[in-house]
Image (cartoon, grey):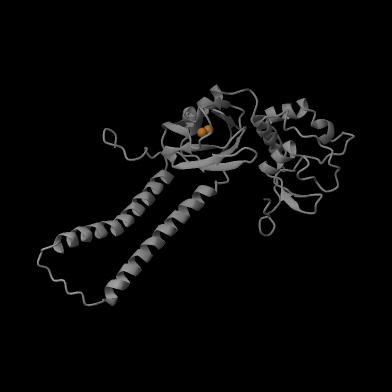
Amino acid sequence: MSGFVRLWPEQASHYAAQVDWLVIGFTGMMAMFVVPVFVFMWVFIFRYRRGHAAERDHRPSGSLKVELTWMVLPFIGALVLFVYSARLFFEARVPPADALEIQVTAKQWMWKFQHTGGQREINTLHVPAERPVKLTMISEDVIHSLFFPSLRVKQDVLPGRYTEMWFQAERPGTYDVYCAEYCGTDHAAMTARLEVLSPSDYQRWLEGADEGRSLAAQGEALFRQFGCSGCHGAASVTRAPPLEGLYGRSVALADGSRVVADDAYLRDSILLPQKQVVAGYAPVMPTYANVMDEEAVARLVAYLRSLADPRPEPATGPSEDNR
Ligand code: CUA
């Protein structure tokens, strides 16, 4: 469609194409309602204009067939759109388990990305084509929103809480990335570039951008630097909950409730340690809110995930809601 007036950004994923079909379908259905209204309006304006000899007899008449048609057809159309869009919505909300994980930190006014291998970049994001990518995002300050127009995905990035988004780009190329939530003076300049690479190019990029240490290894260094091992280490005197095999487990809290040790729980435990105290432990952990930024927390969380039990607990019963 290049060279022609482009109605919307190019499609870089199957999902984008489906979203466009939804928009086209919705617009088409609205047109089916709007066009006849305007057509008949002009017909009647013309036919019943003043001084025109038209039949003006106005006895009530009705047709069950016509009434059923205008009720049943739009009903079916609306249901089709509902099912199609609900399916898309669920697809967009549930990242595949094998997705590549990337940590995103937003701040006024830049986008920072951290890869599992330890690679870090600012305002540019390299991802492989034909592979699901899951973003775990958080903001250092105000609410931002990460928007990939060519992928038709957008998600708010909040301070104090992880949000998630995933996509699978199909074709290598360079695509625009925007902040889609007004976040201050340079909001409009808070843009980035998405570089979708072929799997082999991506491998080459990973090696070129290698920091020498994986994200988890960087987290382990922080773990020592901030003295976490002093209490959480196996040989420590102060009793603190052991962290080996913690990730993904269900944890009993002092208030009697249980939470699943996911990214959000681990983050909160580092920055807001009094929020969810583990049962049987004194609330003695200091907060790291003022000494560690979100990027460092993401590295620590990556390290704690790497300590997860390689054999995850079988899921028991309905999933526990931790919010
Ligand atoms: Cu960040 Cu707008």
| Residue at horizontal 36 percent and vertical 62 percent from the top | 77
Foreground residue among 15 and 187: 187
Left or right relative to 209: residue 40: left
| Residue at horizontal 87 percent and vertical 39 percent from the top | 239
Query: What x and y, as percent, mark residue 231?
Result: 84, 34
Residue 170 seen anywhere in this rendered image of the structure: no
Residue 292 against residue 97 in the figure, above or below: above
Query: What x and y, as percent, mark residue 7?
Result: 32, 40
Left or right relative to 66: residue 281: right
Residue 6 against residue 203 in the figure, above or below: below
Query: What x and y, as percent, mark residue 213?
Result: 65, 25
Q: How many marks?
A: 0
Q: Residue furthest front?
A: 51
Residue 272 seen anywhere in this rendered image of the structure: yes
Left or right relative to 207: residue 54: left
| Residue at horizontal 80 percent and vertical 28 percent from the top | 227
Q: Residue furthest right?
A: 237
Picture quadrant of residue 98: top right
Foreground residue among 223 and 278: 278
Question: In which quadrant of the rendered image does the N terminus lie?
Answer: top left
Foreground residue among 156 and 122: 156
Query: What x and y, as percent, mark residue 315?
Result: 68, 54
